Image: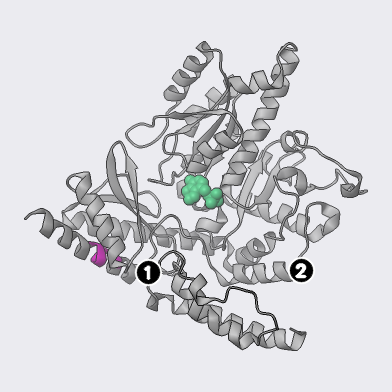
Amino acid sequence: MDAKEFRKRGREMVDYIADYLENIRERDVVHNVSPGYLKDLLPEEAPKDPENFDEVFKDIERVIMPGVTHWHSPYFHGYFAPGSSYPSILGDMLSDAIGCIGFSWVTSPACTELEVVTTDWLGKMIGLPEEFLHCTEGPGGGVIQSTASETVLLCLLAARTRIVNKYKKENPEMNEVEIISKLVGYCSTQANSSVERSGLLGAVQMTKLIPDSKHSVRGETLKQAIKRDKDKGKIPFFICVSLGTTGTCAFDNLAEIGPICEEEGIWLHIDAAYAGSAFVCPEFRHYMKGIEYAETISINPHKWMLINFDLSVMWIKDSTLLVDAFNVDPVYLKHVNQGKVPDYRHWQIPLGRRFRSLKLWFMLRSYGVSGVQSYIRKHVNLAKQFEKLAREDGRFQIVAEVVMGLVCFKLKGPNELNEKLMEEIIEDKRIFLIPAFDKNRVFLRFAVCAERTNSRDVEYSFGVIRDCANNVLAVHSK
Ligand code: PLP
């Protein structure tokens, strides 16, 4: 394809994308295919000779779209949908075109420096203390990672290195394997699955703490767990505090947990993957009380801040804890300006990295702080609208306080009834949502996170749930 054809195809693709997103309401949110559907639609071998791009283009609707779950549909209420704003998509297009691999400053200074500026902008927008920013004298700052899961693993490994070094110094007779076998990390039973997985990947025990009736882990629970573990000769070294859990958007009690971590020398990481975007609005910042005790915090602008996947931001107060922990410095990666600006290869697991800050920059300039705040508040209001409809219906129970864009609800009655309701909604296919489970209770999650969802869509989705509930209850009452 030459530049002339690329211009033509590019225009066609931009039109296709805009049509796709603007008319997404007309597509079924859930796919209608069975496993293996795609291989029957394509030849077994790659084409021997070049094909005309018209043929490729036609196959988007024939081959791809039937097997797509439309995460940007206003009827997508599962998980937490990623953003899809046009400025963000344009940022990714430019990133693909520039195509630099910005692992160190010298490999493309703009890639590193825009990331430094935009993570500072974002840090200030959500009210982070200055120690987390690049613009101060200290070793703190932000970095763009691919996902929040990757960040938890990275922080856990850095915490592991810090504690191993400390123990080796104080107990020269202990070797690394012995120390690691005694380590214990903590998280809520409600923490994202990636936290437990980080423990497995990092070969350390991860103890799950039971939250209170509001799904919040309290300081006293951590204190008791630490005591129990220390009595057994274990070494507490890490905790992942969830601010906005995946299941119910619950908040661990950071203000209580923070001082305990400081006293015990435990690395405090905050996973605010979803809810962190809402801290742009001052009315939600009280959940961050105790943030000064954290070593690291991450939020996913690719969840609730208009950015398309992937873009997760992590801030650290002392970046030397990463840089020194995993420093491999071959001659081919060195450059004369080393040390003056971050070389982000030290702040992440892979070597290569994309120019992701472009999409953050485009989005922040196009929406401004006020635009992002309105976006968050709109979704919170839509969640409140859904909550009101569910309460007014009388047959539903709200199972967790609705504080952001997530409503957790169930039909009053046994689990079996709610499992049936979920099955009915899946079969119906008009909307998409997922179930969750806590304290032996099955419930449903209604997340408002897709950019285009409006008040009428919420009414529509609630109507679908009501229809499904009617069917389930009609059978149940026989
Ligand atoms: N943490 C929380 C609270 C989440 O809700 C999720 C995903 O929904 C994650 C972490 C994982 O995010 P990522 O896909 O960026 O790893």
Q: Is residue 464 magenta?
A: yes
Q: Is residue 6 magenta?
A: no
Give coordinates of residue 135: x percent, y percent: 74, 47
Which quadrant: the N terminus? bottom right
The residue wearing badge 1 is 454
Q: Amino acid at mark 2?
A: Ile
Q: Is residue 127 visible?
A: no
**According to the image, what is the colour scheme of the structure?**
one colour
From this view, report whether residue 96 is shown above or below residue 301.
below
Q: Position of residue 269 (x, y in %)?
A: 58, 36
**Residue sticking out furthest to the right:** 336
- The dot on residue 471 is none
Main SS category, magenta section: helix
Q: Of callouts 2 and 1, which one flags the residue occurring earlier in the amino acid sequence?
A: 2
Q: State the residue at coordinates (63%, 46%).
A: 314
Q: Is residue 43 left or right of residue 323?
A: left
Q: Is residue 124 above or below residue 261?
A: below
Instruction: Tell me the SS state at disc 2.
Output: helix
**Foreground label between 2 and 1:** 2
Where is residue 38? Give x, y as percent.
49, 71
- Asked whether, in this view, residue 120 is left or right of residue 247, the answer is right
Residue 360's spot in the image, x, y percent?
63, 61
Q: Amino acid at mark 1?
A: Asn
- Report which residue position mark 2 lands on: 98
Crowding around mark 2 (Cα neighbors within 10 Å: few <14, some 14 to 19, many 20+) is few
Residue 31 is left or right of residue 171, and the answer is left
Q: Nearer the viewer, residue 204 or 13?
A: 204
Region rendered in magenta:
461-465
